[in-house]
Image (tube, rainbow, N blue to C red):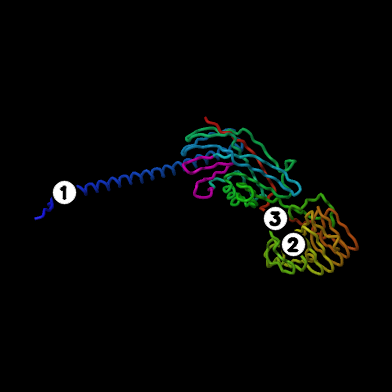
Amino acid sequence: MAWRPSRGIDRGVSTVLGYVLIAGFVALGTTSLVLVGMAVVKDTSDRIGLTQAEDALERFAADVDGLTTGETTAGFRFQGGDEIRVIEDGQLRIVHDQGDTETEVIDTSLNALVYRIGDTRLVYQSGGIWRVDDTGEPLLLRPPSIEYRATDEGTMLVDAIRLKSDYAADVPVAGTALRVNQSQAYPTTDQSNPLENGTVRATIESQFCPAWTAYFEQRTAGAVVEGCDEGTTNQLTVQFSVPFVFTGADKAVIEDPTATPVTWLVEAKHDACGEMGDDVSGEELTESRLYCTERITGKITANTTAAGGDIEIYVDDTIDIKNSDITVTGARNLTLYVNGSVTSNGNAVIGNQSDPTQTRLFFSANATMDKDSGNTGTPDIYGLLYGPESSVYLGGDTYVEGAIVAANVTEQGSPNVVHDEDFEDLRIVEAGAGPPFYYLNVDRTDIDLRDR
């Protein structure tokens, strides 16, 4: 008979093996629980540390704000996280551009305080706080100290806050922030507001450029004319308009080359256009927008009723109409920005006899009512011709009703210029690119950080 192991021995082996397997499973389970528990503890610790760091940095920013408005010292305490460090990053430059004149209002470094909590950084720069990690764009937690107010005719308030010291410390740490210098910068040589015309450009260089972009786009309505990835890397340029204001004309012809120029305004419309893709000649315009064209050679009707608002046309080259009309229907206005020559021959008509104030022509320094091409015959012009850096030539039996403001006006033949009394109280506000404002207040405050 062949030998077989007993069933008792079989049961004994199974029992021992079962105990070994159970012990292994328990050990693995215990290890897994330990690892999961450690991950949960670390995640909770990181979140608590980040919350503490954000609170500490918010208090720091509020205290620094106090230093810009009169306080001289403020204590700070950072807890949660790993370290804080002031790095050399950030440059703010603001200029007021009036075409042929550019005035630098301020050009200053800012620096940034970087607060590291694990893989996350909290960044303070000139009043603003951003959270930066590897998962996406910087998140704005607190706006920087540049504020645009649409009320009060448009005001921009700038506190350029510069952290001076190359400060670094492990967290937790307590210290003192000191105001070591404060100054004001003015947009005009006589330290005055309001600004009269042109554009104000704010340029910021910072490795946190995307965060600044989001702030300007969301909170100030500034027109971003150069983004962080365009032109100079990590440089942002935002533009605001200082509107041209026409406050009326008390006579038909004003030869005044010192009047407020509008070349910058015409150039701003050129920049806003980009491409000259609108063929407006022979068309009825029914959209309230800026049309961009090389030239006008035929009839145009600006239908402001259908458009529901004003209509603008930028003309890069010439307006040359003969026996044609440029007229307005509806109650709103038509504005032409001219960078070349204007001729109206035969029985051409520009504007509306019923209301000359509806039609405005702004001339850059390159533009003229062209002498070489004539302005002959019996053309009628009803409107404002404004170009103190340009020349106006009136020939033949040209009839103008409204007002002319130019460097010089030449008449040949038997033209007739009649003043429209409605122009005496006419107020025109024309802005270039970006939201308009008149008042610019700039302060710079230097802050030093020291351990207690």
Q: For the view shown, which residue lies furthest in the right direction?
A: 413
Residue 189: name its quadrant. top right
Query: Would you say the residues marked 3 and 1 are in contact, meaning their CB atoms lie under 8 Å apart?
Result: no
Is residue 116 found inside the magenta-colored segment of the image? yes
Image coordinates for residue 106, horizontal then vertical, percent: 67, 41
- In this view, the residue in front, 334 or 268, is 268
Q: Amino acid at mark 2?
A: Glu
Q: For the view shown, which residue lies furthest in the front direction?
A: 1
In the rendered image of this protein, does residue 163 appear above or below residue 30? above
Majority SS type along the magenta span: strand
Residue at the disc numbered 2: 294
Residue drawn at 18 percent across, 49 percent down: 13
Is residue 217 shown left or right of residue 295? left
- Labels 2, 1: front one: 1
- Chain part drawn in magenta: 114-139
Residue at the disc numbered 3: 271
3D distance between C-alphas at marks 2 and 1: 101 Å
Residue at the disc numbered 1: 12
